[in-house]
Image (tube, grey):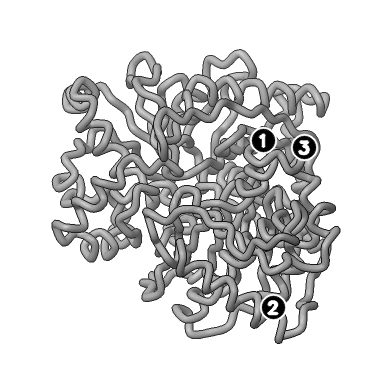
Amino acid sequence: MEKRYFLAIDQGTTSSRAILFDRDFRIVSVGQKEFLQIYPNPGWVEHNPEDIWESIRYSVNEALQKGGIRGEEVAAIGITNQRETSFFWDKVSLKPVYNAIVWQCRRSSDICNRLQKKGLLKRVKGKTGLVLDPYFSSTKIIWLFENRPDIRKMAESGNLAFGTSDSFVLSRLTSGEVHATDVSNASRTMLFNIRTLRWDEELLKIFRIPSSVLPKVMPSSGIFGYTKGLDFLPDGIPISGIAGDQQSALFGQCCFNAGETKITYGTGAFLLTNTGEKIRTSRYGLLTTIAWQIGNKVVYALEGSVFIAGAVVQWLRDGLKLIEKSSEVESLSASVPDSGGVVIVPAFVGLGAPHWKKEAKGLIWGITRGTTEAHIAKAAVESIALQSNDIIEAMERDLGSRIRVLRVDGGASANDYLLSFQASVSNRKVHRPEIIETTAMGAAMLAALGSGYIKDLNSLKESFRIKKEFLPSLKSSEVKKIKSRWKEALKRV
């Protein structure tokens, strides 16, 4: 049977999706299933790994059925995933020994403070490109080992596997034969030396993490393993592409050249700019990360993370009950000409780049008697673009050059007002591609490349198509006023 399709498994923060692409990287069918968000304590966020695995099984089955496609027609599988979220499972049974600790979880804040007091900030950033923040995996592992001695003992005996969700999914897809990750995900653990491209022995010793728990690190494109023993896919399909969701989106946007930049508007918003084979250390609160590795060539990126982006719209829906569906926020915010002076800083889990304020709390500022739900909705949407613009400005200072075009993707990029406002406050063009599922598209492209169906990056560029361009539309005086109010609000969180 002809192998005509590439399957991207997109394991996200609130749902898992399976997207089937044809040979021209056009979407054939999509399967999706949400899973439970677990909040055991304030600031804690967990996922049940079995819920995630079940969501993947369901999504793959749904995508195959919707497309009328047999598993035997799948040429290769690519995995892209929520990064930093930490999974722990038994190497033999493959059963989880604890809930996954999600990237948003702040339970290891005290550990970060403790490490910072020991003077480790500079050393950690120099080796990993990251800052001491609960966002990253290493302090989640430390927390678990300190609070569950039985799991530490399991790790020391060599029976425990740790990994981000790509590693967990890969292990399950191969019936435990492969425990691996790619360089992009490894670079988000705060344990991987982005200069030597190895797990850093000094950091492992300081953090008291045995190397036996860690996955093998591989290039982002190439054969990781083959499906085996599954009830929803046949044996022998190569898993040939893996990248963290944000790096995968950068790849899917075909940002192959230094200086090319993308924003993904998901639960959070994530901005990456390709810096080529050069490691750039940020002086303005950004992270240095590995974008991908193909063969022996490693590409780096500067990254800024907004912790709450699309999640602020979910809060309007689920918390304040202002809307019934997330899609309603665009029409509600369009019913007023501006936010009426209202500013929302959605620091629900602290502030990420470039501010890095772990203890910041959310703020609604500038409310008057005339404030309506529409003003609040508009301020919420604008907060996504304003947080993103803070990162863009920091990136340009680090790069010493101007970013001329922003390529955008993710669910919220369907919101025309958001993109128009982003173009205005950032004073640059915003391009929305024909396919906004570029995270999954990047994984499919990496898999096609890694399995030999695509020969080079130039072939992939032919599949990338811009659908709409947004240009600045607000007067500069109005933008200046908006930015001034934003800066005043930031001082108050």
User: For residue 381, what is the image quadrant?
Assistant: bottom right
Q: Earlier in the sequence, mark 1 or mark 3?
A: 1
**In this view, the mark in front (3 or 2):** 3
Asked if 72 appears above or below 212 in the picture, the reply is above
Amino acid type, residue under disc 2 in the picture: Arg
Residue 468's x, y, as percent?
83, 65
- The residue to which callout 3 is attached is 324
Label 3 crowd (10 A; few <14 / some 14-19 / many >=20): few
Relative to residue 348, is residue 262 drawn left or right? right
Residue at disc 1, secondary structure: strand
Which of the two residues, 10 or 182, is positioned nearer the viewer here? 10
Q: Earlier in the sequence, mark 1 or mark 2?
A: 1
Residue at disc 2, secondary structure: loop
Residue at disc 3, secondary structure: loop
Question: Which numbered disc covers residue 7?
Answer: 1
- The residue to which callout 2 is attached is 428
Amino acid type, residue under disc 1 in the picture: Leu
Residue 18's x, y, as percent?
67, 33
Relative to residue 24, is residue 241 drawn left or right? left
Numbered label tally: 3
Q: Residue at x 59, y 35 (%)?
A: 14
Q: Earlier in the sequence, mark 3 or mark 2?
A: 3
